[in-house]
Image: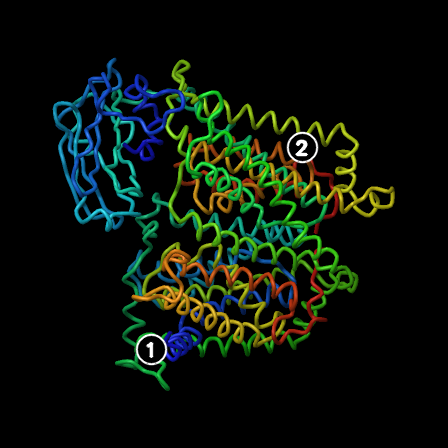
Amino acid sequence: MPTRALRRGVALGALVLALMAILGPAASAAPTSETTTDECALAKPTDDDVISILGRICDRRESPQAPVEGVTVTVEDPAGEVIGEATSGPDGTFVIDLPGTAVENLGKKFTVKLDESTLPEDTKPEVLQRTVAVNLDTDQSVTFPIGAAGPGATGFFTEALQLTIGGIVFSVLLAMAALGLSMIFGTTGLTNFAHGELVTFGALVAFAVDRLPGAIEIGGANVTVVVGVFAAFFVSALFGWVNNAALWRPLRRRGSGLVAMMIVSIGLSILLRNVYQYFAGAQSQNYSQYSAVQPWEIGQILVTPKEVMVTVIGIAVLVGTTSLLQFTRLGKATRAVADNPGLASATGINVERVIGLVWIGGAALAGLAGALLGLTQGFDYQIGFKLLLLMFAAVVLGGLGTIWGAILGAFVIGLFVELSTLLVPAEFKFVGALLVLIVVLLIRPQGLLGRAQRIG
Amino acid sequence: MDFGNLLSLSLEQALGPTAIIYCLAAIGLNVHFGYAGLLNFGQAGFMMVAGYSFVSVATIWDLNLWLGIPLAVVMTVLLALLLGVPTLRLRADYLAIVTIAAAEVIRQTISAASFSEYFGGQDGVTGFIGPFRELNPYSGSIGFAGVNWSGYDFWVMTVGWVLVAVCCLIVWLLMRSPWGRVLKSIREDEDAVRSLGKNVYAFKMQALVIGGLFGALAGCMTALRSASIGPSFFATDVTFFAYTVLLIGGAARVFGPVVGAVIFWFLISALGIFFSQATGGADPLIPDSIMTPTQASLMRFIFLGLGLMLLMIYRPQGIFGDRRELAIDVR
């Protein structure tokens, strides 16, 4: 029973109740249909050669959730053609077989739509359509939770709070990734377009550890993914060192111009992204653990334990890093180099050594952010590249080259991205963040915490 | 391995419509980056705005397709002004970040499902090509020495290469004029030019508009080549590829983009065909355990990334460039 397609359902709190009884804290591939005691059960996977879309429609105002009968559901292929239709049965479930063989359907995305007019009176669907990506040769399941009719099913305030939580989780990860970008810029002047690939690298290292045969256990608990996240941190640190020692240090020695180095970083980004795809494939992946855990319900707010863990780890790492930079001799040296490399060198600071450490630290942070991001929302070979512009936005917003600026900028951008979905469709959330970047540059080009100086 | 086939198919690409599109985009970047020193990473945004404006006249308002050209010009100039006002006073690296962000804003907005009524969302729009197809004088397939194009492709190529020639002439005339010399000196030393009483900001803005207009031609050609237009034609990588084209040929050289585009597409398609032949068939040269056909299709981009890095490190002036002309740096 794949839980991949259900991830979004978890976030919306629909499937949760059904899974609660059966999911252990670390179980991911849970056998769903047999053991559930809920009235609104998932359809059983069909035992045949074709891929089917399984689903159920539940009224979550009832407890336990009540099945909704007689609702028409259609499936559309990637081109928008309707290829299947079904009506939910007495148990609220429906099964739609996808035409064609399993192989033909792999890698495609299908849209499952609810016909709103066939719903019972006085009800309102919380989602009208879901997209299902067929990546495995197994049946895919979807859930449509049904709520009360009319506005205010979830209040504006509740929604805002829920989005704020998502925004904080995202901000912490963005801050970790952006800190390295900002410090590398500060110490070397390099605008590193390949920084996103350091993030992806972390996610892939954790995935590689996860893929090793056998599970890693400590005291009987399966900690494979946890070990993977740690590995992502350390292997990424090594990768950062390699990046600097093999490419960027020789280039600095040659006296390459900053624009030339920027274009080299673009080449590196293209190279690494395709190497990643070569080994990891193009499809979106999840780790074997924690991909679908049940959230805690605090009032109407849903928080998953892993989100809390990711945030706690992230904040701890951020506090640790900033303390190092703020209070140790080395940190002071780093900030001095970021401020003025020539002057720092004149006062006896070994600039190359500081730059090397910044690369190691920055890459380790980026890799950790990638692994944790993969843990919260899945990953593919270009997860970091998609994040790159938001990292730039965060760093520029806070002030290029500053420590606190990168963190502040990341929180502004991260929260803005999530909270903007209150007012605009979710597809515009990145657009908004990038517009913020452009507007800030217009008003305060040095960024929020940057020192006013001529930058043009 | 069929080398004759590889050679003719690669030549087909090297002179074909796609190479023309990248050539035009790179001519625009040449004005921006090569002559004015502006690091515009949003050329795909210029192409997209122009391409969609061009076809929108026909698809949204049902007017003659050719009325789209003035609209595309107006929209491109507006975009350049909109982008230039906040960014041209910034340092090169800021300009790069803002333009790449702006291109992404444009792409995500146009491809949004909310506007799919007008722009077709992720699928893009089709059904505007009639007036252009009617003018096609060719029929059947046309070619020489084993290299063949369809009549339509050859028609696109005829129009395209004429446009490229005209653009090169324009760039050549512009850059040997006093205006062009000011532009080049801005690239070399902005402060010196400012101290001579020139309005650097205005010159940069004019360069941004003119380079953007060449990009606009590339966007319109994209629509004509495919007889359709969609957001996937204008991804961030398009700009990066156009930069690679420019840098292969040599920045700040009139024919740099032309030579670059031909070489770039020859190599890209030769690599693509080589690896697909090496992994395909009953008894592939490279066994499946090392490289599957899917992985083979990535090899050309891996080489592209590597090539761009090596080019920039060892020969930043490209094939024809003059190293002294490229002292561009962040100032």
Q: Which residue appears farthest toward the right when viewing the image?
A: A347
Tags 1 and 2 on a common chain: no
SS state under label 2: helix
Give the distance between the C-alpha atoms of the residues marked 1 and 2, in whole angstroms: 58 Å
Counting from the top left corner in percent of width and height, residue A365 is at 60, 36
Judged left or right of residue B72, residue A112 is left
Residue type at mark 2: give it. Trp
- Please, what is the three-letter code of the amino acid marked with disc 1? Trp
Q: Quadrant of the C terminus of chain B?
A: bottom right
In this rendering, position of residue B310 left or right of residue A60 = right
Image check: A146 left or right of A276?
A: left
Checking the image for residue B149, the label placed there is: 1
Please report, as a chain letter, where disc 2 is located.
A
Q: According to the image, label 2 marks what residue?
A: A404
Quarter holding residue B61: bottom left
* Residue A293 visible in this rendered orientation of the protein: yes
Residue A396 in sight from this viewpoint: no
Foreground of the two, B142 or B74: B142
Which residue is rendered at x = 39% and y = 69% of the image?
A: B273
Q: Is residue B241 left or right of residue B121?
A: right
Helix or strand or loop: what does disc 1 sit on? Answer: strand
Give B35 or A32, whichever is nearer the viewer. Answer: A32
Residue at (52, 50) in percent of width and height? B102
Query: Numbered disc 1: what chain?
Result: B
Which residue is the extreme one toward the bottom?
B145
Q: Quadrant of the N terminus of chain B?
A: bottom left
Please state which of residues B165 and B316 is positioned toward the viewer in this rendering. B316
* Location of residue B150 in the rendering, given as x and y in whole percent from the top left corner: 30, 76
